[in-house]
Structure formats: C-alpha cells, structure tokens
Image (cartoon, rainbow, N blue to C red):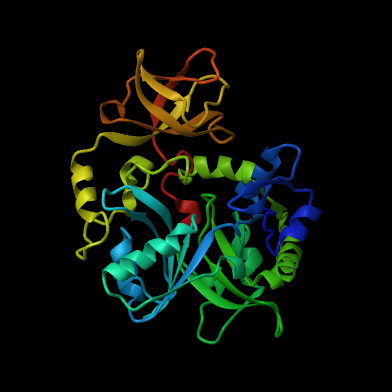
C-alpha cells in the first residue's frame, strides 16, 4: 500500500529530506549530512518539522466533555475555551492506551490529538457504555501539522498570523493554549496555532488544511529565513525529545505499562473527583509500584537500544526504553524502566543485545535539558 504524503511533502522533499515510514506516512527522517546541524538549529534558532502523522479526532455534541472526562487521566472540566492539556488514556488495569493532547473549542467541541487510529473506537466505546450523546470524526487526513520550534519561533510567527475577531494574537498565547486565524493578509490560508511542541523549546504547531500546506510552508519559510530557520527530521527530533524528557509511544510504553512506569505519572491528576477508565487501578498502582521510569547517564560512547537489559550487578532489573548521544550532556543518555528498588542506583550497567562490554550507568534527573521547562514556558 502506498504511503500517504502530507501537504508539506513537496517542500520537505525539495529541501533534501530522506524519508521513512511512520504511521502510514512518508515522514522526513534527515536533511543535513550531520543531524547536529538540525539539532543546533532547534536549540539556537528555529526549525520546522512535519508532524502530520499524528492522529486527530473531532469530539462534539452534548456528551463531548463527559466522554473525555471519562477517558482522560487529566481533569477536562478545568479546561477553558482555547486551552490544551496533555494527558493519558488508560484501560481498566491502568495501562496506557495512548498519550496525547485535548483542545477545547467550546462547551460541546473538542479535538483529541494522539498516535493511533484506535483512539476513535476507544472513545466511542466509552461513550456507548455511558450512554453519552457524542459525535466522533477522524480528521487526520484533513488537518495537517507543521511545528515551528526554537527560541525564534515566536518572532517568526507573531507578525504573520492574523487572529480571527476576538481571538488571541500569537504573542499573547501562553503555554498550552491556541488561537485561530489566517497567515498573512486577507485571503491567506486559515490556520490554528497552538503553543505546544515536542522539542523542549519555546514552540508552536501550525494546523491547516492539506491543500494549503504548500502555501503555509512557503510563508513560514520566508518569514523564518532572517532567523536561520531550518528543517528538522525524525532523527534529530529523537535527540531533542529525549534531552527534554519527552516520551514516545512504542518505546516508553508498549501496552502493559501505567503512566508512572511510562514517565508521564504527572498526567494522573490526584484531585480529579470524577471517575475515569483506570482510576481505581492507578490509585492502587501508585501506592504499590513494581517498576519505575528513570533517566540514565551512560559512560563511554556506546548508545544502547530499546530493550537492552539494565543490570544491578549481574541481575537484570529493567530495560532501556530510549537512548541517544546527547550534544547537551556530552555523553549518551536515556530512559529506562526498572524495578522500584533500583531507582536510586547505586551503580547500574546496561548489557547490549548486540554484544560488547557492559555500559556503566548512573541514575539522573529527567528532563536532562532545562529541567524546570523555563524555555517552553518563556
């Protein structure tokens, strides 16, 4: 089956992208000969990355808030119009089904952004069991997404996005909020701009119709040229997201892990009074944890792979979920899921499945980069 191509594909291909398959799409993997060039552009200037493969579900109708409140670990009732929240969806055992964001447009209109096509059916099942009147529509193929991330991202977008009447300007957006408008003067493409991202930097995501993708890309690229705007692919994205402590479905969780084990325990809201799928299991798993998510700083130059064993002495106590060579830390770093007794070390080692000497590792704080998140909040 032929892979899908986003509305930005022609532009990213013209910039020299190499592509890999991701979630049924041709996904830009790398542009520069050395991904450090892309990495530095993200940390020092600004980048664009095509994140169109994210799955989108429009949630509307009288039961829209109720179905999301019954599905999400976060308290959806606390969202105001124009707010975004990052949350987890769990099953009855407290295991993560998906992680993603909820956008609130009004009392009866929301949007779910996640990673799998099964999310629509998951929400439909919850609505059906609770007798909720809700409309669910997969909008993935009609809503494409270009992320603009990096210290210069606000300067690039602020002057070019004209908000709709009564909507906020880009310069007024706080972290995890959004606005709607158009790019440029009258007749410019309609866009939604959210102050969200996956880089650990100040950043935004620009959402548009696929037929407007080329125009949107061209306008942002032209506005970003004076700032040194560059494209970024999946390989460099993996580096910035691990440094920033951001998880990836299929790596940090694969079906049996709860949010605490997956590194997103902060999404489980203690104060949420309403019931939701997995709430009782999560209360139990919080107090009786068997495994935990930790960060590791590794000695030497070897970078372990997902699934490599973490050892205490000669005893396996966990697995690597993600690891990269970090320009910021100057050494390999990664995430691991380990038995609770070993979350403080002392000394751990990683046994690589491909062989070689074990790698010495020390437990480290996550995020590795900007742990107080001052940059995305700036």
- Residue 217 to residue 270: above or below: below
- Residue 168 to residue 45: above or below: below
Q: Residue furthest right?
A: 14
Q: Is residue 85 visible?
A: no
Q: Nearer the viewer, residue 188 or 138?
A: 138
Residue at 47 percent across and 25 percent down: it is 308
- Residue 142 to residue 360: above or below: below
Indicate the position of residue 349 as horizontal and vertical percent values. 42, 19
- Residue 205 to residue 313: above or below: below
Residue at 74 percent across and 62 percent down: it is 221
Taking 33 as reference, is 21 left or right? Answer: left
Q: Nearer the viewer, residue 218 or 253?
A: 253
Residue at 51 percent across and 49 percent down: it is 200
Indicate the position of residue 338 as horizontal and vertical percent values. 34, 30
Taking 92 as reference, is 189 left or right? Answer: right
Image quadrant of residue 9?
bottom right
Indicate the position of residue 63 as horizontal and vertical percent values. 33, 77
Q: Nearer the viewer, residue 137 or 64?
A: 137
Q: Is residue 335 visible?
A: yes
Indicate the position of residue 99 as horizontal and vertical percent values. 42, 54
Taking 15 as reference, is 350 left or right? Answer: left
Residue at 67 percent across and 49 percent down: it is 232
């Amino acid at each position: 089956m032929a892979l899908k191509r986003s509305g930005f594909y022609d532009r990213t291909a013209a910039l020299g992208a190499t592509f890999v398959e991701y979630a049924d799409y041709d996904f830009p993997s790398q542009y520069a000969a050395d991904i450090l060039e892309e990495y530095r552009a993200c940390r020092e200037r600004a980048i664009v990355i095509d994140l169109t493969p994210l799955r989108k579900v429009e949630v509307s109708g009288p039961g829209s808030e109720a179905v999301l409140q019954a599905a999400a670990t976060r308290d959806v009732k606390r969202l105001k119009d124009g707010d975004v929240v990052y949350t987890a969806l769990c099953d009855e055992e407290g295991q993560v089904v998906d992680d993603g964001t909820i956008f609130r447009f009004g009392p009866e209109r929301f949007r779910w952004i996640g990673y799998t096509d099964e999310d629509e059916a998951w929400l439909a099942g919850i609505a059906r069991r609770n007798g909720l009147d809700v409309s669910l529509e997969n909008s993935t193929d009609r809503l494409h997404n270009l992320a603009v991330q990096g210290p210069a991202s606000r300067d690039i977008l602020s002057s070019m996005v004209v908000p709709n009447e009564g909507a906020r300007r880009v310069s007024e957006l706080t972290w995890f909020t959004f606005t709607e408008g158009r790019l440029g003067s009258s007749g410019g493409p309609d866009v939604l701009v959210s102050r969200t991202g996956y880089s650990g930097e100040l950043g935004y995501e620009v959402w548009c119709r696929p037929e407007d993708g080329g125009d949107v890309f061209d306008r942002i690229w032209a506005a970003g040229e004076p700032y040194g705007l560059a494209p970024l692919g999946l390989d460099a994205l993996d580096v910035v997201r691990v440094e920033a402590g951001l998880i990836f479905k299929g790596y940090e969780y694969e079906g049996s892990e709860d949010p605490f084990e997956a590194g997103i325990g902060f999404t489980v809201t203690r104060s949420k009074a309403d019931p939701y799928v997995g709430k009782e299991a999560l209360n139990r798993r919080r107090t009786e944890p068997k495994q935990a998510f930790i960060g590791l700083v590794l000695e030497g130059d070897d970078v372990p792979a997902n699934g490599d064993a973490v050892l205490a002495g000669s005893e396996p106590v966990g697995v690597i979920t993600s690891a990269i060579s970090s320009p910021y830390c100057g050494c390999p770093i990664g995430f691991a899921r380990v038995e609770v007794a070993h979350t403080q070390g002392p000394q751990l080692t990683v046994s690589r499945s491909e062989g070689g000497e074990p790698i010495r590792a020390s437990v480290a704080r996550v995020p590795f980069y900007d742990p107080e998140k001052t940059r995305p909040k700036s």
